[in-house]
Amino acid sequence: MKPHSLILIALCIVLSLATRVQAGTPEPGAQRTIEGIRFVWCPAGSFTMGRHANEGGSMPREDPAHSVTFERGFWISKYEVTQKEWKDVMGFNPSFHQGASYPDADNRPVDNVSWYDAQDFIDELNTLYPKRHFRLPSEAEWEYACRAGTTTRFYWGEDNKTKKIDKYAWYQMNSGAETNPVGQKRDNAWKLFDVSGNVWEWVQDTLQDDYTGAPTDGSAWIDHANSNRVVRGGSWYNNAMVCRAAFRGGQDPDGHFIDYGFRIVVKPK
């Protein structure tokens, strides 16, 4: 066989393998149901975490803006964990927003759960499905998933006069002072719903004063000298500025609040 023919064959093999690898990688926002919970795919990549210069309504806690790189993508739940999903795993419902006064409660996010309660749910889920690895997202994963490639105050744009937020988030001015069923507002570019508003979402990290010294690989930042855990996204109780992609809150991990919930991540197989 002639040398150039061997080269052509080798090139064809390389291209074929590359195509297979590419075909096996989900598109951003691709969806899968894993053990009864709907997940969306967040691709490998980099983003700038924190507030941008002169961002309206922002806080020093969101500085310094810094680059974070994810070498691997991850699956994150499309919706905040619902009351039905919680009950299916735990066998009871801790939520304040349940009962006859709250129609369609099964599809509302579980609320009134502490960070430790979220860990109990995850532990039970991993016990039920030992081949999986469910966990809370890191703070960096949460913001990366929330932004979905955007760099603006909100994932739907700067919205300087907060004229568009009603279409995307349940917050103080439109929530009716309660949680609402998930998935009713517009999603972001990676198909996540209610990532701003509805309920605060616990993440894995402990709360730091700012991002000085923060990990740049997307991992959770755990400092055992600090006890408070980070919450992100704002809730039905909060004003629009708290629903910004960069806003950081923190709370006692044993705290139970009627506007606190969470979403989860699962490790790719």
Image (cartoon, helix red, strand yellow):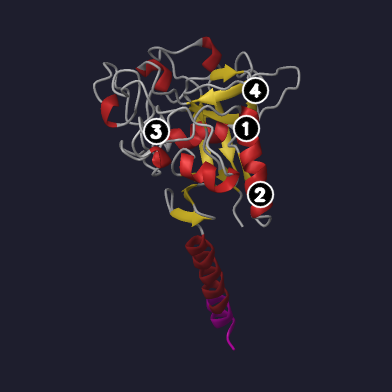
Q: Label 1: how many residues lie within 10 Å, few (<14), some (14-19) or many (20+)?
A: some
Amino acid carrying label 2: it is: Asn
Please say if 131 is above or below 162.
below
Looking at the rendered structure, the secondary structure element under dot 4 is loop
The CA span between labels 2 and 4 is: 21 Å
Q: Mark 3–mark 4 contact, CB under 8 Å?
A: no
Which labelled disc corresponds to residue 233? none
| Residue behind mark 2 | 126
Q: Residue at x 44, y 13 (%)?
A: 58
Extreme-front residue of the structure? 100
| Residue behind mark 1 | 117
| Residue behind mark 3 | 150
Asked whether residue 262 appears in the rendered view, the answer is yes
Q: Quadrant of the N terminus?
A: bottom right
Q: Residue at x 64, y 55 (%)?
A: 129
- Which of disc 3 and disc 1 is earlier in sequence? 1
Q: Quadrant of the C terminus?
A: bottom right
The CA span between labels 3 and 2 is: 32 Å
Front residue (pair 104, 123): 104
Region of the chain picked out in magenta, as a range? 1-8
Extreme-right residue of the structure? 225
Q: Label 2: how many residues lie within 10 Å, few (<14), some (14-19) or many (20+)?
A: some
The CA span between labels 3 and 4 is: 33 Å
- Which of disc 4 and disc 3 is earlier in sequence? 3
The CA span between labels 1 and 3 is: 32 Å
**Nearest to viewer (mark 3 / mark 2):** 2
Amino acid carrying label 4: it is: Asp
Residue 23 placed where, x, y %? 48, 63
| Residue behind mark 4 | 254
Please say if 108 is above or below 248.
below
The CA span between labels 2 and 1 is: 14 Å
